[in-house]
């Protein structure tokens, strides 16, 4: 993305983030600060390296804790704004160079298109963050605007459609400069008052970073067809790999899960995600099993 476009996106981000704090008479509508939320997500990924070669795939267990606070304000009969701050981390069992700390500033607008519970809800969200990795070359800021519309189509089925844009500006290595556009759908199927079956699909078109093992001679014979893109040799996976930047790759993500509300304050979510990146007839598949606990303090 050109510098002018990046500057425009950052200006729009600042305007959206400042909006809820500067609305006239906003104090008359301000809601109480929501209780802080503590989340722990555990993921088992069988291809954390996103390698195209089965023997080069590296698996890992990742622990992702997060603490977030949020303030909401009502600015109209059916319209609400929010401002949030989240601190998230990632702790890898095997590949510690992927450990990170990520502060994220968020802002959003929620508009209810009617008075009933079954009426659609429109959401506009924006996140600004910075990834501090254990491996310095991966440092970078990111911006993620998102639009979503959610509606209840049956007594027990909620459907959400979304579009999102992501842009990451690496601080040192352009290999990690990525941007992309995503569209997706999620369905929550209620089968008891406290339990929901979750199905999701997302398609993303854009840049990705994958990793290949450094080949012996000749490089062209290591796998066919060769992976083409800007490259950076690294020791992320305890041996010499190369990070490769792929432009205009297709990523398909399918998620199946179960969400259970243990009580008023605690939510459990478990499931499976299959992700497949495809570029130049080369596939980079991964299987991810996850368990998440979210608790309002």
Image (cartoon, rainbow, N blue to C red):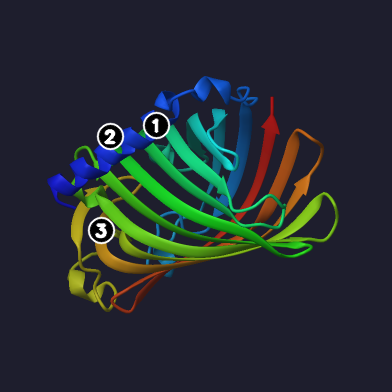
Q: Which mark is residue 139?
A: none
- Mark pair 3, 1: CA separation: 39 Å
Q: Is residue 237 left or right of residue 191?
A: left
Outermost residue, left side = 3
Q: Nearer the viewer, residue 16 or 105?
A: 16
- Of circles 2 and 1, the one toward us is 1
Residue sitting at x 29%, y 54%: 179
Q: Is residue 119 left or right of residue 8?
A: right
Q: Which mark is residue 19?
A: 1
Is disc 3 placed on a helix, strand or loop? strand
Q: Nearer the viewer, residue 7 or 68?
A: 7
**Residue 220: image x %, image y %?**
19, 74
**Residue 108: image x %, image y %?**
47, 40
Sequence-earlier tag: 2 or 3: 2
Note whether 270 is above or below 215 in the view shown.
Answer: above
Q: Nearer the viewer, residue 182 or 278?
A: 182
Is disc 2 placed on a helix, strand or loop? helix
Q: Nearer the viewer, residue 289 or 97?
A: 289
Residue sitting at x 27%, y 72%: 222
Classify mark 1: residues with Cα within 10 Å, few (<14), some (14-19) or many (20+).
some
Q: Which mark is residue 244?
A: 3
Q: Which mark is residue 136?
A: 2
């Amino acid at each position: 993305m050109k510098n002018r476009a990046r500057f425009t996106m950052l200006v729009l981000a600042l305007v959206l983030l400042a909006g809820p704090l500067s609305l006239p008479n906003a104090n008359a509508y301000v809601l109480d600060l929501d209780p802080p939320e503590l989340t722990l997500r555990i993921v088992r990924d069988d291809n954390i390296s996103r390698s195209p070669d089965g023997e080069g795939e590296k698996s890992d267990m990742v622990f992702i804790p997060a603490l977030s606070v949020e303030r909401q304000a009502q600015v109209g009969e059916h319209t609400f704004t929010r401002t949030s701050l989240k601190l998230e981390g990632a702790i890898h069992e095997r590949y510690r160079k992927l450990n990170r700390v990520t502060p994220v500033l968020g802002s959003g607008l929620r508009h209810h298109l009617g008075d009933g519970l079954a009426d659609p809800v429109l959401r506009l969200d924006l996140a600004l963050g910075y990834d501090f990795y254990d491996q310095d070359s991966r440092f970078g800021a990111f911006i993620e605007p998102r639009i979503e519309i959610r509606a209840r189509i049956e007594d027990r089925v909620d459907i959400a459609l979304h579009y999102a844009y992501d842009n990451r500006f690496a601080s040192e290595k352009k290999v990690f400069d990525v941007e992309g556009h995503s569209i997706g759908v999620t369905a929550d199927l209620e089968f008891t008052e406290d339990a929901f079956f979750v199905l999701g699909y997302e398609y993303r078109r854009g840049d990705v970073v994958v990793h290949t093992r450094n080949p012996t001679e000749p490089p062209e014979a290591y796998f066919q067809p060769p992976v083409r893109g800007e490259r950076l040799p690294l020791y992320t996976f305890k041996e010499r790999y190369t990070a490769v930047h792929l432009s205009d790759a297709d990523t398909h993500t399918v998620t199946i899960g179960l969400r259970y509300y243990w009580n008023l304050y605690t939510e459990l979510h478990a499931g499976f995600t299959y992700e497949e990146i495809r570029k130049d007839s080369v596939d980079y598949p991964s299987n991810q099993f996850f368990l998440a606990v979210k608790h309002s303090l």
